[in-house]
Image: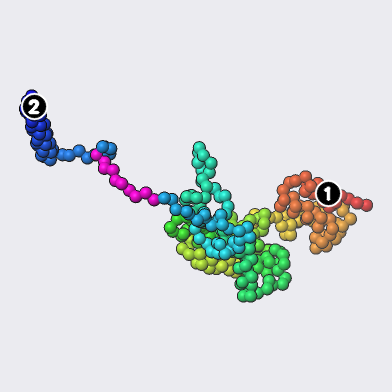
Amino acid sequence: MASLKLNKNLRLFFSLKLNKYNLGFNRRVSTETADDEFRVLELYPRKQSAKKVDRPYFKDAQVIPPREKRMPIDQDWPSVWPTAKTFRPSSVPLPLYQGYDQKRAPPGKYANAELMKIPNFLHLTPPAIERHCNAIKKFCTEWPKGLETEEDCRKHFPVQIIESDYLHSSPSVHDERSRIVTLKVKLVDLNLDYHGRDKILRLLGGRYEENSDTIVLVADRCPTRQQNYDYLIYLLTALHHESWITEPWEHEKAEADMEKFFFEGSRIQKKIIKTIKQSKHPKSSLSEEELKTSKEVEYFEEAVCNLLNEGEVKNNMLKYKDAVVKALITSS
């Protein structure tokens, strides 16, 4: 009986061993045949084939709290943020939020790229500005006397230059609009007579603001700001000198070419004087020069000029009516 059991065990052992060799042979053959074909790229390997690697385990070390948590209440802020720099959330003890989320609250200051992109002015707090002013005060001069009001400044410095600077959150800080220069000056500050004022207005065209009596010149044709500024100064100088020049053809200017009505030498003046002399007016015996300086004619001149230059409003119409009655009525 013992020998029979031993024989059965030996047969079972040899059969298992042969099966094992057969499986190994089949695998070797399958791999050799698979090498001849294109292998499949497994982007996501199976979990069974992934080998587990034993990694060392570290305990969480004690991290020092951020600087904003350790700041005292009376912290000297210009010492914390002395110059312009990128936003650092651990140094700013303020609950700042920047950005937009459709389903959540605005993102906080930690890990917020929006706060890092935009320029900040945390270095220009009132105490920091006061400290800088006190430091450079010894290099500055006193404010000149006589320039206490805006009117005084405009009187002594009539020309106003406007320039613009632009900030960008991009690698290039160049902006083409920064070359544009605007010059403003009051027309009354140029001290022109009537001819010069009329001529410079015709030369300016739409560059004159009638409501504020201001000349506005804009230059953007040159590539740099300094070139545009020099061009505006030259342009203003040329306009001022040209307005004082009287060309021979300007004397041919007729009444229809005038920008407004002038009573002196007009047909209305001649007709009103002729009408007074032909009527039974007490002053009809006076000469033509004496009638021009009379109160009736001067009042009529003012009424006609207001009516033709300002428009047919109610006050001007009533004033013109009174002037006509006074100039033509016969008094005893």
Identity of the residue drawn at 6% across and 27% down: 3
Query: In the rendered structure, which amino acid carries the disc numbered 1?
Result: Asp
The one of 190 and 86 positioned closer to us in this rendering: 86
* Above or below: residue 102 compared with residue 127: above
Residue 217 seen in this snapshot: no
Disc ID at residue 2 = 2
Q: Tell me, yes or no, whether the highlighted magenta stretch contains residue 54.
A: yes
Q: Which residue is mark 1?
A: 322
The one of 271 and 77 positioned closer to us in this rendering: 77
The stretch in magenta equals 49-58
Identity of the residue drawn at 50% across and 37% down: 103
Q: Residue 259 is drawn in which quadrant?
A: bottom right
Q: How far across and down, in percent of the image, does residue 295 sit?
A: 84, 58
Q: Tell me, yes or no, whether the highlighted magenta stretch contains residue 214.
A: no
Identity of the residue drawn at 11% across and 38% down: 28
Query: In the rendered structure, which amino acid carries the disc numbered 2?
Result: Ala
Disc 1 is placed on an element classified as helix
Disc 2 is placed on an element classified as helix
Q: How far across and down, in percent of the image, does residue 290 sit?
A: 83, 62
Q: Residue 69 is drawn in which quadrant?
A: bottom right
Kindly check if marks 2 and 1 are in contact, taking CB atoms under 8 A apart as contact: no
Which mark is first along the chain, 1 or 2? 2
**Horizontal placement of 132 versus 309: left or right?**
left
Disc ID at residue 212 = none
The one of 63 and 5 positioned closer to us in this rendering: 5
Q: Residue furthest right?
A: 332
**Horizontal placement of 11 versus 326: left or right?**
left
Q: Nearer the viewer, mark 2 or mark 1?
A: 2
The one of 163 and 273 positioned closer to us in this rendering: 163
Other-residue count near label 2 (Cα within 10 Å), few / some / many at <14 / 14–19 / ≥20: few
* Above or below: residue 59 compared with residue 289: above
